[in-house]
Image: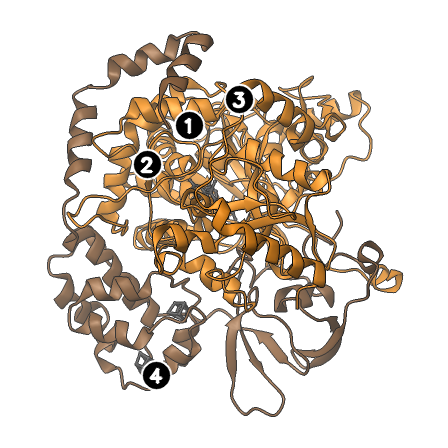
Amino acid sequence: MTTDHAIIPSPQETGQMPGFVTVEVMGKKYRVPEGITVIQALWYTGHEMIRGIGCLGGTCGACGMVYRMPGRFELLNGLGCQTTVRDGMWFSMVANYPAAQAQYRVSDLTNAKEQLFELYPESARCVNCNACNRVCPQGIDVRSSIWYAVFGDFQKVADLTMSCNMCGLCITRCVADMPPNLIGLYARRAQGALYAPQAEELGRRIADVAEGRFRDELDQLLTLDPAELKARAAALSR
Amino acid sequence: MATDSLTESRERVDASRAARKGQTVALFPPAEKEVLLQKYHPDYKAEAYRALRIGPNAGQKTVHEVADLLEGDSPVAQADLKSVPDYTTDLLIIGGGGAGCTAALTARAAGVKVLLATKLRLGDSNTVMAEGGMQVAVKPGDSPVRHFLDTIKGGHFANDRELLKVLVEEGPSATQWLLSLGVLFDRDDDGNLRVRSGGATSTPRLLTCKDYTGLELMRVLKDALINEDVQVVEFAPAVELLSDGAGRCTGAILKNLDNNRFMTVHAKAVIVATGGSGRLHIQGFPTSNHFGATGDALPIAYRLGAELAFIDTFQYHPTGAIYPEPMAGLLVTEAIRAAGAQLVNRLGERFVNETDTRDVVAAAIIRECVEGRGVITPSGRRGVWLDAPLVDLVNGEGTLDTRFPNMRKLFSRYDIDIRAESVLIHPTLHYQNGGVKIGVNGDSTVAGLFVAGEASGGLHGRNRLMGNSLLDIIVFGRRAGQAAAAYAASTTQGPATLDHVAHFRDALRQAGITAPSASPRLIPDYVRREEATTRS
Ligand SMILES: Cc1cc2nc3c(=O)[nH]c(=O)nc-3n(C[C@H](O)[C@H](O)[C@H](O)COP(=O)(O)OP(=O)(O)OC[C@H]3O[C@@H](n4cnc5c(N)ncnc54)[C@H](O)[C@@H]3O)c2cc1C
Ligand code: SF4
Ligand code: SF4
Ligand code: FES
C-alpha cells in the first residue's frame, strides 16, 4: 500500500517540492513538509502509532496533544488530526487520563438534577478559572455548561456541548479536578431521556406498526416482480 | 494560499451563482444513468476486479484489495491457541462501534455474560463520524412503505427485501430506544422529531443531531455500555475466529496491540460488528472512514465458511474534501446538497442534479474531471466545486452556522469560511455496501456466528441510501444482540479449534495461491519508510 493517501502526494506526482518546517517531536528535531497535521508528521517521521488515532476527522477525540511555540510561554493543546505543524513547534501526544466516571443508569434516575451532586459532587467546585474553555479544541463554553448543570438547566448544557468529542483535554486542566465533559454528558443524557418532550408522532407511528398497519402492503412488496417494484418506486413524487 | 487557477475558477463559481440559484438540472433518465455508471463509476471498472479462487464465494468477483484479504493467510499458528483461554464468556462481541455497542447492551439486558473486544478505543469507529442523519419514517405524511420503496430504488432493486422490511418497520421503535438512552435528536417546536431531506429520497426523513448525529449516538451508546456489567477490552482486535471443527463458531483469537500477544476467547456465540473497509483504499481512493476500517470481518468470517454478499460494490461518497491537503478524503455531508449547495465544474457550470443517488452524482463528478472540466489542486488532486455559500442564500443567513457547525469548524481550521467560499471535492471511498450475508436476526451462514452493521451485507443492495446505515446498526444491532444471546443461552461451549484455518490453508495451496499476504490487515500502513525518504 502506498502512503500517499495519508501523508502527501510525492513530489514526483506534483512536480513541485513542498516547503519544510522543523518540529520537535517528544524532544527530537525533525524536518517535515509544511501544511501537514501533527499525526501526519508523526507518520512522516516514522512513528508507528496505534494509540492517539481514531477518526482522523476531528470527531472522536482520540488525538489530544500538547505543544509549545517558540517565544511563547503558554502550554497549548489541540487535536493531533486537526492541528497543522508550524516551524519550531514542540509537541507530544497526550496520554490517557484516567477519569473518575460515575456509575449510573439513566432509566433508574429519579431526580437527575439533584443526583448530579451525589454522582459528581465535584461539579459544585468550579472556581471559574476558565482553563477548560481555553483548552477545548471544539470551542465549547465548558465553564458555563458546568454552571448550567449545577443550576439544573440541562437543556442549556445540551445546547452548549453538542460538539464535545470527549477528548478529555478539559479534564487535564480543570483545577477543581472534575471531568467537565462527563458531567456534561450526564446532563445531556438525563435531558434526552427524562426531560425532553414526548415525540407524539413517533409514538403514533410505533402504535401503527404494532397494529400491523403496514404489514400487508410491505408483504406485498416482498414478492412483487422487479418491473412492478420499479413502477411503484418511480411513482413516488420527489 | 490557493494557486491562480484555483482562484480564477472560484471566481467563475461566484460569478455564476446568481444565475444558478433558481436553476434545476433534470435527474438522469434510467438509460443514460446506466451509461454514465458503466463509463465512470469505479464499481464498473473491469480491471479493478478479479474472481475469487477459493471459499464460499469462489467464482464471484470482487476488487483486488478485498480479494487479497479473502485469499490471505491467517496471522496465527496452532501454537498461538491456548488450551486455557484468557477469557470465557457467553457472548463475544467483536467491534465497539454503533452496532457492537447496541448488540452488547441488548444482549446484556437479555441476561447473558458479554465480552466486547475492539480494535482501538471503545467508540473509535465510523459511527462517531456520521454527520448527515438517520432515516426513520416518523412523519404522518411518510410511511415505512415509502421508506422501503426509496431504499430499494437507491439500492438498484437488489436489496434483501426481508431485511429491508425489518429495517423500515422497526425503525420507529429503535428510535424510541435511543431516546430512552438519552439521545438528543433535533426537534420541531411542537416537540416532535424534526426531519430533514437527504439525497435520493421522496420525502424528508432524516433525524439529525445537527451535523453531529453519529457523535451523539456513539457518545450515548458508549456511556450506556460502560455503565453496564459488560467487560470491554480495548486495543484488542480479533484476528481469527475459532470453531468446533464441525462448522460452528466457538470463540476468537484477539491480538493485544500493546504487547502484540495473542489472547484466546471461548464464547458460545460471537457477533462480528467490525464495520467497513475504507482504509483499504480500494482503487486508490482516499477515504472518509476512521483509522480502523480495514474490513477485518470479511477474511475471518470467510475462513470459517461464512458466505458474503454484494462484495463487489462500494459506495464512493460524491463529496470528499480534496483541499486543503490534510483534509483529503474527509466527508462533506450530503445534507448540505439537500440544503441547496450545488456542484459546479471548473467553468462555473452545473452538471448533475445534486439530489440524484450517490453513485450517479459520484460518476458525474468523475466524468467532469476525466473530461477536463475539473479543478486541480496544488498537490495534484482533481475535483469540482461545492457551492456552500448558496445554502445561506437559499435558506437565509445563519443556516450554515446552525445546521452545519461541524463542517464550518473543520474548514475554518484552515481559514476557509464556507459561508463565503466554495470548497473543492471529489468522490471518496465511503461505505462497504456488502459484507457477510445475514438473515433477519443477524445470523450468518455459520452457526453461532452473527454479524451486524456495515460488516454485514444484503440490506443495502448495491447502493446504500444515505441515513440508512445508522438505522441499520441500531435495528440489526439489537436483533443480533437478542438472537445471539438466545443462542448462547441455549447451547454449551463447544471445542474451540483452528481446524477451519488448517482447511483453509489446504485450500489456498490447492488453488496454487502461494505467498498470500496476512489478513486481516488491522491498521493501514501510513508510516513513511526510510527508502521513501531517500527516494524523494
Ligand atoms: C464520515 C462518515 C459519515 C457518515 N454519515 C452517515 C450518515 O449521515 N448517516 C448514516 O446512516 N450513515 C453514515 N455513515 C455510515 C455509518 O456511520 C456507518 O456505516 C456505521 O456507523 C457503521 O457502524 P458499525 O458499528 O457497523 O461500524 P463502526 O462504527 O465502524 O464500528 C466498528 C468497530 O469495530 C472495530 N473493529 C474493526 N476491526 C476490528 C477487529 N478486527 N476486532 C475488533 N474490533 C474491530 C472498529 O475499530 C470500530 O470501533 C457515515 C460514515 C462515515 C465514515
Ligand atoms: S468539552 Fe472537554 S472533552 Fe469535550 S471537546 Fe472540549 S475539551 Fe474535549
Ligand atoms: S477548568 Fe474546572 S474549575 Fe476551571 S472553569 Fe472549567 S470547570 Fe471550572
Ligand atoms: S483522530 Fe479523531 S479527533 Fe483526531
Image-quadrant location for residue B115:
top left
Host chain of mark 4: A
Relative placement, left or right, of B248 versus A146 is right
Which chain: brown? Answer: A
For residue B16, above or below residue B44: below
Residues at marks 3 and 1, CA–CA distance in whole angstroms? 36 Å
Nearer the viewer's eye, disc 2 or disc 4?
Answer: 2
Mark 2 Cβ inside 8 Å of ligand 1: no
Determine which of the numbered discs, if any, sits on residue A20 in the image: none
- Element at label 2: loop
Residues at marks 2 and 3, CA–CA distance in whole angstroms? 24 Å
As shown in the figure, which amino acid type bears the numbered disc 4?
Asn
The residue beneath circle 3 is: B29
Point out the quarter of the image occupied by ligand 3. bottom left
Residues at marks 3 and 4, CA–CA distance in whole angstroms? 58 Å
Determine which of the numbered discs, if any, sits on residue B205 in the image: 2
- At 62% from the left and 47% from the top, the residue drawn is B384
- At 27% from the left and 63% from the top, the residue drawn is A159
The residue beneath circle 4 is: A130
Which chain: orange? Answer: B
For residue B130, above or below residue A165: above
As shown in the figure, which amino acid type bears the numbered disc 2?
Arg
Sequence order check: which comes first, mark 2 or mark 3? 3
As shown in the figure, which amino acid type bears the numbered disc 1?
Gly
Mark 4 Cβ inside 8 Å of ligand 3: yes
Host chain of mark 2: B
Looking at this view, name the residue that lies furthest to the front.
Answer: B19
Viewer-proximal residue among B469 and B384: B384
Q: Quadrant of the C terminus of chain B?
A: bottom right
Label total for image:
4
Mark 3 Cβ inside 8 Å of ligand 1: no
